[in-house]
């Protein structure tokens, strides 16, 4: 039995996961499997067909893996045309990277910071002596990007204020 160390909830307590269960069946589709070789999870072969059977039985719905990307324009080519100042950051060991926008910048204002060996949310955690050089470089780059954007926004607002006078 898998136990969530944070809350002490287990999969045997499904009432705690009902909302997420429905979302993961309809809109927030995470194609993540496990093999117990490159990860520490029990082997699990994920597939849309397997998810569809599970969701049909539990909720009477079919997964809609493209619902969020299509509804909100989260496809890389659409973001590059319409988005601005979004920093995408994930590591090569982050299981959620499978749902990422890719490993290269989408545009000047849609950068991707790929962290070799980085895991989920490691780049937003406090710096530790165990951080890899790649993690340290990524945090510096993130800081540079965000600082540049803050300066640009401040300059734009100052200019807008001067034009309004």
Image (cartoon, grey):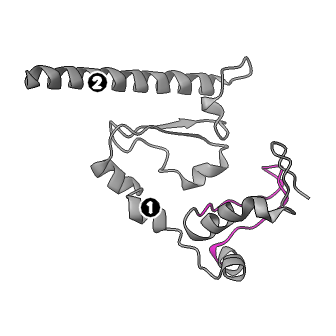
- Magenta span of residues: 29-50
Q: Which residue is mark 1?
A: 69
The reply to whether discs 2 and 1 touch (Cβ–Cβ < 8 Å) is: no
Q: Is residue 162 magenta?
A: no
Q: Nearer the viewer, residue 151 or 6?
A: 6
Q: x%, y% of residue 52?
A: 65, 78
Location of residue 30 with respect to 54 vertically, above or below:
above
| Label whose residue precedes the other's in the sequence (2 or 1) | 1
Location of residue 60 with respect to 95 vertically, above or below:
below
Q: Secondary structure at mark 2?
A: helix
Q: x%, y% of residue 18?
A: 71, 65
Residue drawn at the location 74% of the way across and 22% of the way down: 130
Residue drawn at the location 47% of the way across and 22% of the way down: 143
Left or right for 84, reference 103: left
Please identify the dominant SS of the magenta region.
Answer: loop
Left or right for 88, reference 50: left
* Quarter assignment of residue 59: bottom right
Location of residue 46 with respect to 1 vertically, above or below:
below
Left or right for 59, reference 140: right
Q: CA distance from mark 2 to mark 1?
A: 29 Å
Residue drawn at the location 66% of the way across and 50% of the way down: 95
Per the rendering, the mark at residue 152 is 2
**Label 2 environment density (alpha carbons within 10 Å; few <14, some 14–19, many ≥20):** few
Q: Nearer the viewer, residue 88 or 162?
A: 162
Residue drawn at the location 40% of the way across and 41% of the way down: 105
Q: Nearer the viewer, residue 11 or 94?
A: 11
* Quarter assignment of residue 146: top left
Quarter of the figure that contains the C terminus: top left
Residue furthest to the top in view is: 129
Q: Is residue 44 magenta?
A: yes
Q: x%, y% of residue 49?
A: 65, 78
């Amino acid at each position: 039995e898998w136990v969530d160390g944070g809350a002490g909830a287990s999969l045997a307590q499904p009432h705690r996961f009902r909302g997420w269960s429905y979302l993961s069946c309809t809109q927030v589709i995470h194609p993540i499997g496990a093999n117990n070789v490159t990860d520490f999870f029990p082997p699990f072969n994920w597939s849309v067909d397997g998810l569809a059977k599970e969701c049909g039985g539990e909720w009477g719905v079919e997964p809609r893996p493209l619902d969020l990307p299509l509804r909100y324009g989260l496809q890389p080519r659409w973001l590059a045309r319409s988005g601005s100042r979004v920093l995408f950051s994930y590591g090569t060991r982050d299981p959620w990277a499978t749902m990422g926008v890719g490993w290269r910048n989408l545009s000047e204002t849609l950068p991707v910071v790929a962290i070799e060996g980085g895991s989920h949310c490691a780049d937003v955690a406090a710096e530790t002596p165990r951080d890899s050089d790649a993690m340290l470089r990524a945090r510096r780059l993130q800081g540079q990007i965000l600082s540049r954007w803050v300066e640009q926004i401040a300059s734009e607002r100052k200019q807008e204020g001067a034009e309004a006078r």
